[in-house]
Image (spheres, rainbow, N blue to C red):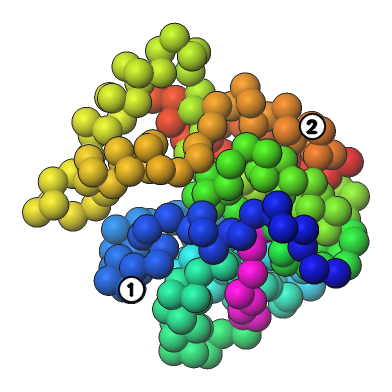
Amino acid sequence: MPQPTWFLDETTSLGRENTDPEHVAHYDEKEDAGAAAEIVTLGQLLPATTADVVDLGAGTGQFALLAAERWENVTAVDPSPVMLDHLRQKATAAGSSLYIVEDGYLTYERASESVDLAYSRFALHHLPDFWKAIALARIRRMLRPGGILRLWDVVYHFPLNEAIERIEHWCSTGYSAMEGGWTRADLEEHVRDEHSTFTWLLEPMMGEAGFVIEDAQYDDDGIFAKYILRAV
């Protein structure tokens, strides 16, 4: 059925960097997803090689390409045509069996309770909070009971009265344009134009969507959070 007219078009929430071919071409140099360590961690939780895995917001596929070497059924989903063009080139060069779909959190369809592991890294923040909750509920529906959502994102873990100081400190850690990496302007753009939220707003959404938090890790600056969520 067609979406109602009030439904969010995720292609309008991609963020400038995900539609810029120049940025995408150099994304892997700028951002290390730590994919090999993620495969080890998640492989211990999901040892069966026949598992069905979905990477939502897969981007350039750092995780998805390695996951396709570990599990037989891996799908990379992203709403950015530019990101997916880059990923397809990488997959072809690697001879990967990865299945690639141009879609988003709010539109990707899978049969209910058909997925063992959903993965999402640095992507959910592109959605405003209302739509994050909708996305989490949709992910829960596709996961089998006991299935896993690995969620890693910019999620602010500090009291509201510290927000200005903490965000200013984070922005001050940006690199110069000459050094490479994420610049202060990049970090400021993230805070201003994207939709990262607080842990004390996001975590109740997880419970409402039908997850229990099995593990939560926060960095010392209160900027990043990693979760292992279990579908109940």
In the picture shown, does residue 73 fall above or below 195? Answer: below
Left/right of residue 232 with respect to residue 7 in the rendered view: right
**Badge 2 or badge 1: first in the primary sequence:** 1
Residue ID at (66%, 43%):
132
The picture places residue 29, in percent across and down from the top left corner, at 29, 64
Mark number, residue 159: none
The answer to whether the residue labelled 2 contacts the one labelled 1, judged by CB atoms less than 8 Å apart, is no
The picture places residue 174, in percent across and down from the top left corner, at 22, 40
Query: Quick one: which residue is furthest to the left in this view?
Result: 178
Highlighted range, magenta: 98-105
**Residue type highlighted by circle 1:** Pro
**Residue type highlighted by circle 2:** Gly
The picture places residue 170, in percent across and down from the top left corner, at 31, 30
Inspect this view and state whether residue 175 appears: yes
- Name the residue carrying label 1: 21
Inspect this view and state whether residue 212 appears: no
Tell me the element at label 2. helix
Residue ID at (73%, 27%):
204
Residue 8: in magenta span: no
Of marks 2 and 1, the one in the foreground: 1
Residue 99: in magenta span: yes
Density class for disc 1 (Cα within 10 Å; few <14, some 14-19, many ≥20) is some
Residue ID at (90%, 50%):
145
- Name the residue carrying label 2: 207
Density class for disc 2 (Cα within 10 Å; few <14, some 14-19, many ≥20) is some
Left/right of residue 120 with respect to residue 214 in the rendered view: left
In front here: 88 or 163?
163
